[in-house]
Amino acid sequence: MRIVAWNILHGGGPRRTAEVALALAGYEPDVVVLTEFRAGRGGQLRAVLADLGLEHQRSSVGEGGVTAGVNGVLIASRWGLRGVEPGPPEEEGIGAKWVSAGVSCGGRWGEVMLGGVHIPPEAGTGRAAMWAHVVSAAGAWAGGAAVIAGDFNTGRHRVDERGSRFGSVAMMGRLATLGYVDAWRAMNPGSRARSWRGVGSVGGAGATRVDGVWVSGAMSGCISRGFLGVEAMEAGVSDHAPVVVEVG
């Protein structure tokens, strides 16, 4: 299973949407999690993903009455998706930050629980509530095959950032306590690569790694590859690099 998680920067634009689609096609994914997805321009991306075989899709925006211009989360899969609990958080303003499903991939796992998430930034409304929801979902799914992927706006001090300014680091620790593994880090233990370009040029002030794919203990022994698509970030397709992980 090849998973791509990518913050596409405000849903893309007239030029970037096509470039996002081309980049995604090049990664040949089985499952995609897009954050900052917008329904208004998202039809083109959804159509491309369907053409790539990822025709099973769920979105936190543009469905159920959520405003099309809101930054949300899209998951797209090669296999069928089933709505699962826990659903989106009830707190106002963060319901678009989460979407989940059971992925009917068959094989050794049968069904994989998948959560796509965009944790609000440090000063963002609902950050603590969103993290609490992620940990709750992780706990509910910890006994089986599960993936939680997206933009966490959090990382490890002096590893995923230059200093120690990240908040909510303890919440990432709670994921680890539940048996989840940061799949990219497992494949790149000594890397200081960044998934957000920071201010100015790539690698500018504040550049961090905030995007990731966490897999449950049942899947952690099957991680076979993990890399950042930094070329897309360097080309300005987004201010984030996609995270590409293979499990199984």
Image: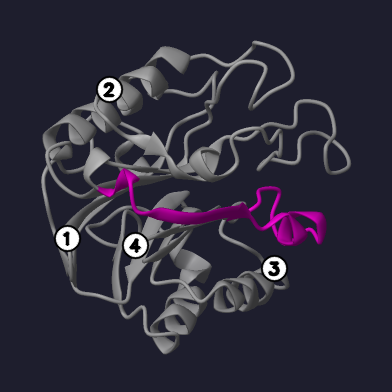
Quadrant for residue 82, please give it. Answer: bottom left
Q: Is residue 44 left or right of residue 159?
A: left
Q: Are marks 4 and 1 in contact (CB under 8 Å)?
A: yes
Range of magenta residues:
219-241
Q: Nearer the viewer, mark 2 or mark 3?
A: 2
Q: Are marks 2 and 1 in contact (CB under 8 Å)?
A: no
Please, what secondary structure does the residue beneath circle 2 have? helix
Q: Observer-nearest residue: 1 or 171?
A: 1
Quadrant the C terminus occupies:
bottom left
Mark 2 / mark 3, whichever is N-terminal = 3
Q: Which mark is residue 248?
A: 4
Q: What separation in Å lies between label 4 and label 1 (alpha carbons)?
A: 10 Å
Q: Which mark is residue 16?
A: 3
Please, what secondary structure does the residue beneath circle 4 have? loop
Mark 4 / mark 3, whichever is N-terminal = 3
Residue occupied by mark 2: 132
Give the residue at x 45% y 76%. 43
Residue 121 within the magenta-colored segment of the rendering: no
Figure check: 10 above or below 203: below
Residue occupied by mark 1: 109
Give the residue at x 55% y 25%. 155
